[in-house]
Image (spheres, rainbow, N blue to C red):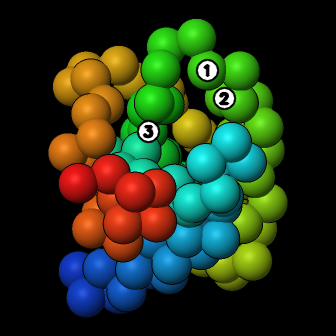
Amino acid sequence: MADKYTEEQVEAIKEKIFSALESVIDPELGIDIINLGLIYEIAFEDNGFTEIKMTLTTMGCPLADLLTVQIHDALKEIEEVKEVKVNLVWQPAWTVDKMSRYARIALGIR
């Protein structure tokens, strides 16, 4: 049986996951998936199961598989994460408004 994490520990682990996802760069735009606003939810369970709900900038984006592999690679570094599931979701639809100020400036979008 896996240890139970406190709420504070779960939040700290989710922060580590969030930080690791900042290393996953969209190769077309050259900006990480966090600043692009592609990550909608990070769920972490006591048994180490981690679910990432994310979207893509467009439904036909050919990068889904590549980004999924990069997410798995980034999260391998986090000891508490034992299993990762990446769920692509299309609701709500991604818009430029989901991007961070940094990403908009980097891409020249006002």
| Element on which disc 2 rests | helix
Q: Nearer the viewer, mark 2 or mark 1?
A: 1
Asked if residue 52 is positioned above or below residue 62 in the image, the reply reads below
Could you tell me which residue is drawn at 49 percent across and 13 percent down? 59
Asked if residue 68 is positioned above or below residue 81 in the image, the reply reads above
Could you tell me which residue is drawn at 79 percent across and 60 percent down? 73
Point out the tag, 3 or 1, that comes first from the N-terminus.
3
Question: How far apart in space, not on screen, are marks 2 and 1 (Cα)?
Answer: 7 Å
| Element on which disc 1 rests | loop
How many numbered tags mark residues here?
3
Inspect the image, locate mark 1, and give the three-letter code of the amino acid beneath it: Cys
Spot the residue most to the top.
60
Inspect the image, locate mark 2, and give the three-letter code of the amino acid beneath it: Ala
Circles 3 and 1, Cβ within 8 Å, touching? The answer is no
Label ID, residue 54: 3
User: Which quadrant is the C terminus positioned in?
Assistant: bottom left
Question: How far apart in space, not on screen, are marks 3 and 1 (Cα)?
Answer: 13 Å
Q: Nearer the viewer, mark 3 or mark 1?
A: 1
Could you tell me which residue is drawn at 27 percent across and 33 percent down? 95
